[in-house]
Image (cartoon, grey):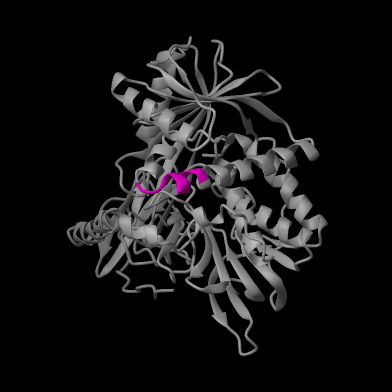
Amino acid sequence: MTPLWLNDATVPARLRLTPGLRFDTVVIGGGLTGLVTALLLAESGVEVAVVEGRRLGAGTTGATTGKISLLQGTRAQRIAARHSDRTVAEYVEANRAGQQWLLRYCEEHALPVQRLPALTYAQTEDEIPAVRAELRATRAAGLDTYPVDDLDVPFPFHGAVGLADQAQLDPMALLAMLAADVEAHAAPIFESTIAHGVHHRDNDDLVIDTEHGELAARTIIVATGTPMLDRGGFFARLTAQRSYLTAFRVAEPIRREMFISAGQPTRSLRYVPGRDGDLLLVGGNDHVVGRTGSTSRRVDDLAEWTRTWFPSAEPLQSWSAQDYHPIDELPYAGPLLPGRERILVATGYAKWGLTNGIAAALALAGRINGKPPRWSGALATWRPAEVKAIPSAAQTNSAVALRLSTGWLRMARSGYGPIPTEGCGRVERHGLQPTAVSTVDGKTTEVSAICPHLYGIVRWNDAEKSWDCPLHGSRFAADGTLLDGPATASLPLLSGPAVVPVTDPPRGGPSTVFPEKI
């Protein structure tokens, strides 16, 4: 499942880390927040470097819808339900600052951007109250939103709230330009370098432990989707969500607005300009990572919905993205621990990272340079208002505890089974060892089924051929390679890959290796 944006992306590979280096600031994570933060710091004279675990664009930014909007589904009313009017206004101001910075950057670097309205629409009559509530909340926060009673669209539409002059772009073109700009300011980017942890050195430096050696810094910024450091407990303050997107070629006219539904299942639409004609991008069907049945059915459902309302729709490409929803609805950009400015984090954008991510970068860079934006309090990592989110946190973490116990109980009742067929995976118990067995591209591989973060039992994702942890959203390739955190280590390989034979051979003996907690 490769994002559409990677088809024509020209992003050269960067070298992995050379150990033993030191910088004033090191940014962990080469997505939008990480690159913009690094650029802002480099422009102000800070010696900075970026460390990316995979390739630039391999995370959420490279899989986003590319919408740059201050009207964000039903975000305003959700934030208003937990916070003061002033806080909602500060959140909108933060996103406006992020949007303006991004649009200005694109104009200065001749990056194509389409300016068009954004709409949050009701796909059923039951969603009309949510649309009206979003209109009230956004107007109270200072946005010039307006009601839309009717619109000539082929899909179910029962009114909307709109906001003019928003924007969309190709996120990989943006990342490529940002990366080149960062390096032009003498700030190196190291790819294929997973950070495992951080410790203090005797001279008061912070040292990042990576798979290729140590990297020292005065200040560290963790911009990895969910922080890869457990200190601060951000993994328990976020819910990892996966959503799906498909690009279609259609004969029907495509509206020039960005749409997102006010209710579930989410339906997000935009057009994508192309050399061979415009494409239709449809997204939605989100779920908590590792807590659904067949993920491929969710992809199929998007295609079925699209063909229902656009009969000529021809699916060209499908992919997915991972986002993190904060328990009290506001993003985080600030210290990992209260009162300690040496390690900063940014996370919790709730699927609106093209504005929130840049707002977080502006807040973090301002914090380091001693000039934080006036709205940065709305993105604080530690705020008294989070006390109101305790019921939500309790509900979130009780679900985690349930998945932890049911995963181990299910594993305890399972034993050896037949080799999975192509594209399938299964968790088995081999003696005392929970084992994740899968067959991908004709090769069967066995890895530990225990997530090295907090020991959850992983589940097979049949759409992406990955092992997903239902506790906090860590993901691993079929061969155990780490894809998404908060885990910082891959699943240990137990056996394989082996070519699948015509008949099932006897299994080897069980393994009893349990991974250590990082």
Q: Residue at x 77, y 61 (%)?
A: 44
Question: In the rendering, at what x and y percent does residue 30 appear?
Answer: 63, 55
Q: Is residue 452 above or below residue 21?
A: above
Q: Is residue 90 above or below residue 111?
A: below
Q: Is residue 112 left or right of residue 316?
A: right
Rendered image quadrant of residue 123? top left
**Does residue 309 show up?**
yes
Count all numbered tags in the image, as a single digit. 0
Q: Residue at x 71, y 73 (%)?
A: 24
Q: Residue at x 34, y 56 (%)?
A: 458
Question: In the rendering, at what x and y percent does residue 111 appear?
Answer: 75, 35
**Does residue 500 show up?**
no
Write the start and end of the magenta stretch as one range: 82-89
Inspect the magenta stretch and tell me whether residue 468 lies in it: no
Question: In the rendering, at what x and y percent does residue 242 appear?
Answer: 42, 44
Residue farthest bottom in this picture: 202
| Magenta stretch secondary structure, dominant | helix
Q: Residue at x 24, y 58 (%)?
A: 398
